Each structure stands twice: as structure tokens, then as C-alpha cells.
Amino acid sequence: MATGGRYRNQNDLITEALANLGVLAPGQSVDVEDFNYVQEKLDSIFRKLAALEICVVADANNIPGEWFSDLADVVAGECCTKFGVTPDDYTKLINKGLGGVNGVDVGTGAAAKSLRAINRGRYTGERLRTEYF
């Protein structure tokens, strides 16, 4: 896993999410089946993040470093049911990511709030729509 640089890639994100799930021990190689499962879910997770207006991951191989740990928490929470987590761990992982369990609304989990705070006030490059009366 790369430690330097401004951007991280999809493989780093999947590996970190699997480690957050407790599936991957330090020094252990990633199981191909687990890797492929998480990789297949990434597109829908990124689309969900964009629809909730949390962040837009335009390129999975150029993930800003400041988003990385929060995105790994979101991915771990969204993929945790396949990996047989306990009900308590399920609640913890979901609420640490996007939220949506035990009274926490979807989009208000810890990682979602952090990503919104990071992106607040950033230049978007969009044209400002105005109405003249």
C-alpha cells in the first residue's frame, strides 16, 4: 500500500476497508474473492455518496488523500453484511460510515459528516445560476 503522494487508488481503498472490517490482518494478503466483492460495490457506493451530496469520487484511482480514511469507513460499513459481523459491530460500522442505524439518519454517520466538513466551502468550478428580475 502506498504511503506517500497526494492521491490514493482503488486497491488501497479496498485493502483499507477490508482491514477496517477485520477481514485482513496485518501482513496478510487480500483474498481475491473478498477483494472482488468490495470492488463490485464501489461504483454503487460512490454513486450513493454523490446522490447524498457528500462527495463526488470522479476517479477511483485518484482518491484525494484527505478523503481516504473516511471513504474506507464508508466502504467497510456498506460491505459489512457479507463478512458476518456481529449485530453490535454492524451498528458500529454503519454509523461510523454513512449512518442509518439506531436513529442515525443515512448521510449523518461519522465519516459522512467528516467528508462534508472537508468539502465545505471548496471551489466547485460550477457556474453560479442567477435570476434577474
Image (tube, rainbow, N blue to C red):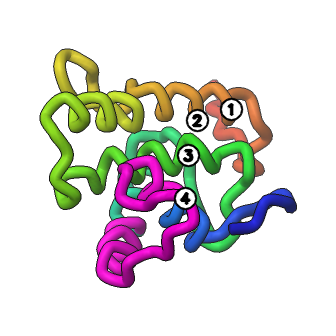
Give the vertical position of 83 relative to 43 (above or below).
above
Picture coordinates of residue 81, whole percent (x, y):
18, 52
Q: Is residue 2 left or right of residue 85?
A: right
Residue 108 visible in the current orientation: yes
Which amino acid, by three-letter code, is at mark 4? Pro
In terms of sequence position, does the residue under pointer 2 or pointer 3 come before the other?
3
Q: Residue furthest right?
A: 5
Residue sitting at x 20%, y 46%:
85
Which amino acid, by three-letter code, is at mark 3? Cys
Q: Which stretch did the figure color magenta?
A: 16-42
Q: Secondary structure at mark 4?
A: loop
Tell me where residue 117 sits by quadrant.
Answer: top right
Mark carried by residue 26: 4
Mark carried by residue 55: 3
In terms of sequence position, does the residue under pointer 1 or pointer 3 come before the other?
3
Question: Which residue is under mark 1?
Answer: 118
Residue sitting at x 20%, y 16%:
103
Residue sitting at x 19%, y 29%:
88
In terms of sequence position, does the residue under pointer 4 or pointer 2 come before the other?
4
- Taking the magenta stretch, the answer to whether it contains residue 23 is yes
Question: Which residue is under mark 2?
Answer: 115
Alpha carbon separation for disc pair 1 and 3: 9 Å
Alpha carbon separation for disc pair 2 and 1: 5 Å
Picture coordinates of residue 59, whole percent (x, y):
62, 70
